[in-house]
Amino acid sequence: MRSTRVLTGAALSVAALGLTACPVFAGDFGKIEISPNPVQAGKSVNLNSSDCGKNGSASVDASTLGAGTVTLTSKGQTHTENVQGSLRVPASTKPGNYGIGGKCANGREITGTVQVTAGTTPHGKTKTGLGATSEDANTTEILAGAGVLLAAAAGGVWMVRRRRADGSA
């Protein structure tokens, strides 16, 4: 019985140490900033990282998006401590989150996530949930609704005043 407790305690200790060690390795990666994010399929995104050092460069694998390899560089940039580049998300890319990653010339690994939305924008009338659309509303309906609200407010004021006049609270 006692050996079971010792083994259970040891197993839990090892598990706890293993869970605390994972974030140490995750922190070793630099970050790729993506803008705009989310992006529509068929549009371009800008990639930026400050983890490659001054006058650095990086090669980023964006094959999860179907965009191949992208080179980030600080050449021609105002801020030479950042590497920058862009890529076009193929129009055929399905909505979802896509991980991209690469390696800087200084050996630092960088990662980021591109969130892709559907490439089409909604067209047509907005459904209001009341059987009509926002474009079907006319001035008469708006005035009728305002009249109902005004009548309700007036009735409420009348009820409050009537109670006070009667002496009831």
Image (cartoon, rainbow, N blue to C red):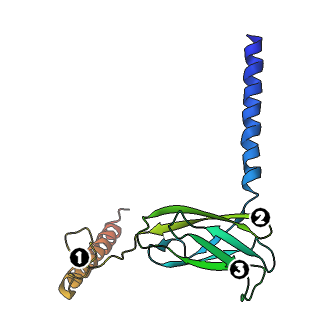
First along the sequence among labels 1 and 2: 2
Locate residue 109, reporting x and y percent: 73, 63
Crowding at label 2, few (<14), some or many (≥20) Cα neighbours within 10 Å? some
- For the C terminus, the image quarter is bottom left
Identity of the residue drawn at 75% across and 51% down: 25
First along the sequence among labels 3 and 2: 3
Labels in figure, total: 3
Report, in whole angstroms, how far the alpha carbon at label 1 lies from the one at label 3: 49 Å
First along the sequence among labels 1 and 3: 3
Nearer to us: label 1 or label 2: 2
Residue 36 image-quadrant placement: bottom right
Report, in whole angstroms, how far the alpha carbon at label 1 lies from the one at label 2: 54 Å
The residue that mark 2 highlights is: 108
**Residue lying farthest to the top in this orientation:** 1
Secondary element at image label 3: strand
Secondary element at image label 2: loop
Q: Is residue 2 above or below residue 107?
A: above
Nearer-the-camera pick, 73 or 134: 73
The residue that mark 1 highlights is: 133
- For the N terminus, the image quarter is top right
Locate residue 83, reporting x and y percent: 71, 78
Residue type (three-letter) at the residue carrying disc 3: Thr
